[in-house]
Image: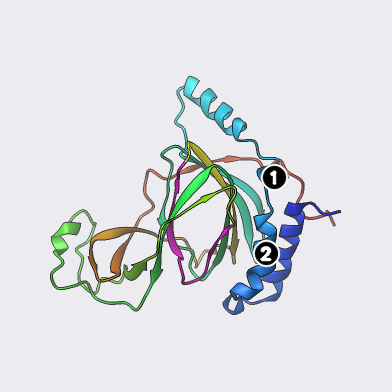
Amino acid sequence: MATPIQKLANLSAKLFGMVSPDKITKEHLTPLIRAINEIKMEDLNFDVKEIDEIDNYRRLDQQEIAPVTYIHLHQDRTFTMSIFVLKSGGVIPLHDHPKMHGLLKVICGAVKIISYTEINKLPLPEDYNLSNSQSQSQPLTRSYKNIKTVKKNNDIILTDKDDCCVLMPIEGNIHEIQPVTNIAAFLDILAPPYESDQSCHYYQELPFSKLNMKWLLEIPQPRSYWCDTLKYKGVPLFDPM
């Protein structure tokens, strides 16, 4: 009999393997949402104490502690599945998932999700002082190609008792994830996976808004964000061939 995580993996493989990413709707995702909402950290053989023990050892050894730990579960041409563990102060900075669907289910602690939805591109308002962004490597213009016009969505806080958060290719696709508790972990499904020509981009909010519109500037990956890795110790997601 398949375990909850195996059921989720099989549903993911079936959906993302049969339906083109640009044709997927929330209705297509409904069985997947039901399945991921049932997942507990015990189903993944995930023990938060192991993270604490590893980090404590590194402190004693005077090693740098990664703000985020990444646990790889699966990746193929149609989807990826992984666990992210956020330590106190460890933020997954504002970023996007171009043309991707995402499901995020908290399995330990609580997280805050700050998200934006891209809207029709508008130039920066005339009264915005471009000198506010002098830290950039090149001067900004009002038509700067790496500025996105967005609307900010309501912030949400999710715990392991809550249903998953669903991120669509447009709605809420640009987002930041912060731990609310000292340590928080979530199961993450992305479809399709990142490819060489479809990479993640990072952003910062420019200090200006108009009505419900804001502007985001694409930036390099923040130096404060990096991950160490931990091996997945749960059951295999798929039966061996």
Residue at horizontal 82%, vertical 54%? 2
Give left or right: position of 154 versus 86.
left
Q: Position of residue 192 (x, y in %)?
A: 59, 67
Can residue 52 be found in the magenta stretch? Answer: no
Asked which quadrant contains residue 122, the reply is bottom left
**Gap in Å between the C-alphas at discs 1 and 2?**
17 Å
Give the side of residue 148 with respect to residue 115, left or right.
Answer: left
| In magenta stretch: residue 168 | yes
**Label number found at residue 32:** 2
Residue 8 in the image, given as x and y percentages of width and height = 72, 58
Can you say which quadrant of the picture contains the C terminus? bottom right
- Disc 1 element: helix
Seen at 67% across and 76% down, the residue is 19
Circle 1 packing at 10 Å, graded few (<14), some (14-19), many (20+), is: many
Label 1: which residue? 44
- The amino acid type, in three-letter code, at marker 1 is Leu
Q: Which residues are magenta?
A: 164-180
Tell me residue 72's x, y (percent). 63, 48
| Residue 113 horizontal/vertical position (percent) | 45, 54
Q: Is residue 97 left or right of residue 212?
A: right
The amino acid sitting under disc 2 is Leu
- Is 189 situated above or below 229? below
